Amino acid sequence: MLLKDKKALIFGVANHKSIAYGIAEEFKKNGASVAFSYVGEALKKRVAPISEELGGDFIFDCDVTNDGQISSSVDIVKEKWGRVDILVHSVAFAHRDDLQGRFIDTSRDGFKLALDVSAYSLTALCHAFEPLFSSGSSVMTLTYYGAQKTVTNYNVMGVAKAALEASVRYLAMDLGPNGVRVNAISAGPIKTLAASGISGFKTILSTIEEKAPLRRNVTQTDVGKSAVFLASDLSSGTTGEVLFVDSGYNTVGV
Ligand code: NAD
Ligand code: 0WE
């Protein structure tokens, strides 16, 4: 029970395949209390039963591009829990059109949207929830290899993830003096809603099976178990870090 008595706030569950769902499952197994955000009424209908199933304490509406909704969320969490020990940011979005073709064709609006939802939102959440953090609190986000190397079609999301990974380092520097750690998990490709309809995704999955040291793709449970490590005292000396949970793919050269 590595997370006994810990309060974990989870942004980014959409359905049972979400990486955040796998993280929440492992958190519950380790004794944490969890609460979930959703975006709008349509997703509330999906997230409410998932929260019931996992024994979530409460759910709350939070579009991370909306400062008003972020501050209402802080009020709700303050009233329900009074503190946050673990914050999971598992949120990303870009226009579908920007995840194909040439990166050079990305519009100003497409760039702004991807960076706002997928990168700035982590800073916005850390800023808003800072008063509820205390020494030992742990923040984590989800990133991807395409931040560090070009991945065909990942395009503006790669730029957003690069900004996200740099944000992790600066947030770790700002929150570190108070004993709050901030890290990223760089997950290998997983077939979730956010991966559906991506052209070439199957090829990416088979490339991992062929070339990664572990010769298999990672699962939401693999990511969830590493999230428990980052959330717990086992990682007390680690902050500003990107932890790859990718079957070792990123370490392979020729
Ligand atoms: P998912 O579709 O299940 O999760 C994405 C979540 O983002 C959804 O719950 C959605 O509601 C939320 N979201 C989108 N816009 C939002 C907004 N404005 N406000 C609040 N929430 C918003 O897909 P997933 O694969 O579980 O993605 C979770 C994270 O993992 C993302 O950051 C993604 O980039 C990252 N990631 C995914 C993979 C993969 O292959 N699936 C690999 C590495 C990293
Ligand atoms: O971060 C991601 C997915 C992010 C994502 C996915 C979508 C699809 C639906 C962001 N926005 C949208 N918008 C939509 O309308 N991943 C790491 C998964 C992923 O996405 C890719 C990948 C991989 C891997 C896109 C192109 C190439 C590879």
Image: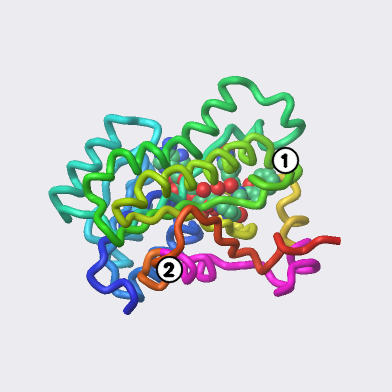
The residue carrying mark 1 is 153
Q: Residue furthest right?
A: 254
User: For the residue with label 2, is its CB less than 8 Å from the closest atom of ligand 1?
Assistant: no
Residue at 49% x, 59% y is 19
Q: Which one is earlier in the sequence, the residue at label 1 or at label 2?
A: 1
Q: Which residue is at the front of the view, 253 or 82?
A: 253
The residue carrying mark 2 is 235
Residue at 18% x, 41% y is 75
Looking at the image, how many numbered discs can be counted on the residues?
2
Mark 2 residue type: Ser
Q: Main secondary structure of the magenta part?
A: helix
Secondary-structure class at tag 2: helix
Q: Relative to 230, is 169 above or below? A: above
Residue 17 rendering spot, x and y as whole percentages: 50, 60
Q: Residue furthest top?
A: 108
Q: Relative to 126, is 139 above or below? A: below
Mark 1 residue type: Asn
Residue 186 rendering spot, x and y as whole percentages: 58, 56
Q: Relative to 49, is 196 above or below? A: above
Q: Which residue is at the front of the view, 107 or 43?
A: 107
Location of the N terminus by quadrant is: bottom left
In this view, the mark in front (1 or 2):
2
Does the image show residue 44?
Answer: yes
User: For the residue with label 1, is its CB less than 8 Å from the closest atom of ligand 2?
Assistant: yes
Q: Residue furthest front?
A: 177
The image quadrant of residue 8 is bottom left
Q: CA distance from mark 1 to mark 2?
A: 34 Å
88 sits left or right of 3 in the view: right
Range of residues picked out in magenta: 207-230
Secondary-structure class at tag 1: loop
